[in-house]
């Protein structure tokens, strides 16, 4: 039982030491994704391209079930 508590204590200390680093990595990746998305939007606007807007779900269902389709 004593060795189990020792392992548990080591895991708890490791978790406390790794948690801030892992949080920072996740935060940096999220910021990188946001920057990349902003750059892509800027390029699309600069070149005059617009992304096609998705049709609402109801319109897709209506087209799929329309007579003659």
Image (spheres, rainbow, N blue to C red):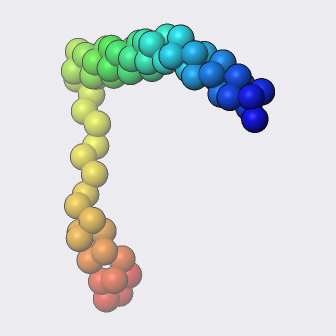
Front residue of this view, candidates 4 and 25: 4
Q: Quadrant of the C terminus?
A: bottom left
Where residue 23 sits: x, y (%)? Answer: 44, 18
Q: Residue at x 25, y 57 (%)?
A: 55
Q: Residue furthest front?
A: 2
Front residue of this view, candidates 29 and 60: 29
Q: Which corner quadrant of the image does residue 47 belong to?
A: top left
Q: Residue at x 66, y 18 (%)?
A: 10
Front residue of this view, candidates 28 and 69: 28
Residue 40 in view here:
no
Q: Residue at x 34, y 83 (%)?
A: 65
Name the side, left or right, on which 12 lies relative to 58: right
Q: Residue at x 28, y 36 (%)?
A: 51
Where residue 33 sits: x, y (%)? Answer: 39, 20
Q: Is residue 51 above or below residue 58?
A: above
Q: Which corner quadrant of the image does residue 46 belong to?
A: top left
Name the side, left or right, on which 58 lies relative to 1: left
């Amino acid at each position: 039982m004593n060795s189990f508590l020792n392992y548990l204590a080591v895991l708890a200390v490791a978790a406390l030491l790794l948690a801030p680093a892992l949080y920072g990595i996740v935060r940096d990746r999220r910021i990188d994704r946001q920057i990349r998305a902003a750059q892509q939007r800027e390029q699309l606007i600069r070149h005059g391209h617009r992304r096609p807007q998705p049709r609402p779900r109801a319109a897709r269902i209506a087209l799929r079930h329309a007579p003659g389709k």
